[in-house]
Image (spheres, rainbow, N blue to C red):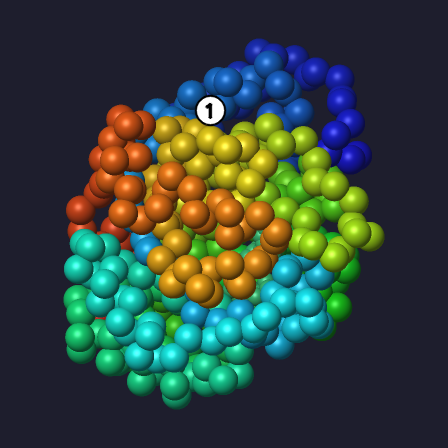
Amino acid sequence: MELSKKVEEPPINRLSHLLKIIVQENYLPEANEIVELLNTGQLHETIISYATKVKQRHFGDEIHIRGIIEFSNYCVKQCKYCGIRSNNSKIVRYRMEDEEIITRIKLLHQLGYPTVVLQGGEDPMFSTSRLVNLIKTIKKSVDIVITLSIGERTQEEYVELRKAGAQRFLLRFETCSQELYAKYHPHSSFKKREEALLRIRKAGFQTGTGFLMGLPGSTVEDLARNILYTSKFKPDMIGTGPYIPPEGLTSLSPSGDRNLFFITIALLRLLNPLAHIPATTAFDTFDMRGREKLLKTSCNVFMPNLTPCKYRKLYTLYPSKSRVDKDQWHFLKVDTTLSSLGLTKATGPGDSILPESQNLIQDKGETNE
Ligand code: SAM
Ligand code: SF4
C-alpha cells in the first residue's frame, strides 16, 4: 500500500489500549500494530500527546545542543537519494583543512557547546590515521565530546577512532527493507550496512541510528518495520528524517504523507523513551516550523549547523538544505529561539542515559569484546 492511500479505520478502543500498554508497560508492538497506529488519524493527536509526556518525564524542558560541522562533501558512495553522491558531477566539492576544523571547534567550545558532530561523505582523504590525529589534537585542545558521522569503516578503524577519543557515532541504516536498500544503494546491501552498525557498537561508541522516511517506493509497512528495527536495536540516539528529493533526480517520485513523519517520530519516542532524539534539519524543508514542533513534542536534541558559511552552501544533500541552515536557528540565536518555545538549553555533555550504555561513558575507548 502506498503511503498516500487511505485504509479503513480499525476499532479505536483496541488501538487506544495498545497505546496505553506501550506507554505504561513498555509493550513492544508487532509491525502490523504499528501500521494500524500510523493509519488511524483519529489517534494521531493522542500519540503526539503521549510522546510529549514521555519526553518531559525523562528530559523535562531541556534540549541538548550538538553543533554539527560538515567537513567534506567528497564521497565515494552513490546513495541515489543523496546530493553529494560520488557520481553527481554538478556540485562543487570541498574538504576542510584540519586547522580549519580545529579553529571551528574551538569557537564552538567558546560558545558553550559541549559536543560536536563531525559529519562528511566517505572521503578517502580523511583516512583513519588522519582522523585519529585530528581527534587527539581536538581532545588535547578543548574539553568537548566528539560524535562521528562518517559512514562505514572496518572494525579495526572504528576501534582506533574510539581509542583516539571520539565517544559517539551516528550511522543510519536508512531502510531495513533489503529490496529498497539495494535499489537506492547499488554498491551495497542492507546486510553490509547492518554489519557496520554492529561494528560501531562493538567498538564501544554510544551509537545512533535511524532511517529515511518516505523514500519513493516505500510503504506504511516499511515505515512500521523501520520503527521496529530501530527500537529493537536500542540505540543511544535516533537520527531519522524525511527524504527530500535532490536536484537532478527527476526519475524519483515525490514523498508521501507528511503528517506520518511527525507520528513516526512520536512512536519512536514512545518505544525508545530514553533515547536522545534530534529534530533533524530535513523537517524544516517541508514545514517551516517542523523542528520547532518536534522540539516541543517528541525530540530533545537540536543540532545547529556550525559549518563555515562558504562550505555550508556546498553540502547540498538536498536542494533547500543551505537555506534551512541559515534560518532563525542560526547558532548565535539558539538560546533565544529555545526560550521563545518555552524550552531551555541543557547543560553537560548529554551522554546516553540508557542503563546498558553507562559503561561507555568514559574516555577509555574500551571495546565490548
Ligand atoms: N556519509 C555518512 C553516511 O552516509 O552515514 C554521513 C553523511 S550522510 C550525508 C548523512 C545522512 O544524510 C544519511 O544517513 C542520509 O540519511 C541523509 N540524507 C542523504 N540524502 C538525503 C536526502 N535527499 N534527504 C534527506 N536526507 C538525506
Ligand atoms: Fe555518501 Fe553518506 Fe551521501 Fe551516501 S548518504 S552518498 S555515504 S554522504
307 vs 257, nearest the viewer: 307
State whether residue 265 is above or below residue 118.
above
Residue 291 percent location from the top left of the image: 44, 37
Q: Quadrant of ligand 1?
A: bottom right
Q: Quickly name the residue at label 1.
A: 48
Q: Is residue 267 visible?
A: no
Residue reaching furthest right? 251
Residue 250 position within the rendered picture, expressed as x and y whole percent measured from the top left: 79, 52
Residue at image position (37%, 42%) is 329
Element at label 1: helix
The foreground one among 294 and 367 is 294
Quadrant placement of the C terminus? bottom left
The residue under the point 31% across, 49% down is 331
Q: Residues within 10 Å of mark 1 (few under 14, many from 20)?
A: many
Task: Single out the residue that lies furthest toward the bottom.
Answer: 129
Q: Left or right of 359: which side holds 153? A: right
Q: Position of residue 188 (x, y in %)?
A: 69, 70
Indicate the position of residue 314 as horizontal and vertical percent values.
53, 63
Between 305 and 239, the one nearer to me in the picture: 305
Q: Quadrant of the N terminus?
A: top right
Residue 70 vertical position relative to residue 339 in the rendered view, above or below: below
Q: Residue at x 59, y 43 (%)?
A: 242
Please state if 317 lies on the left or on the right of 49 as rendered: right
Using residue 191 as the reference point, say whether residue 299 is left or right of it.
Answer: left
Please, what is the three-letter code of the amino acid marked with disc 1? Ile
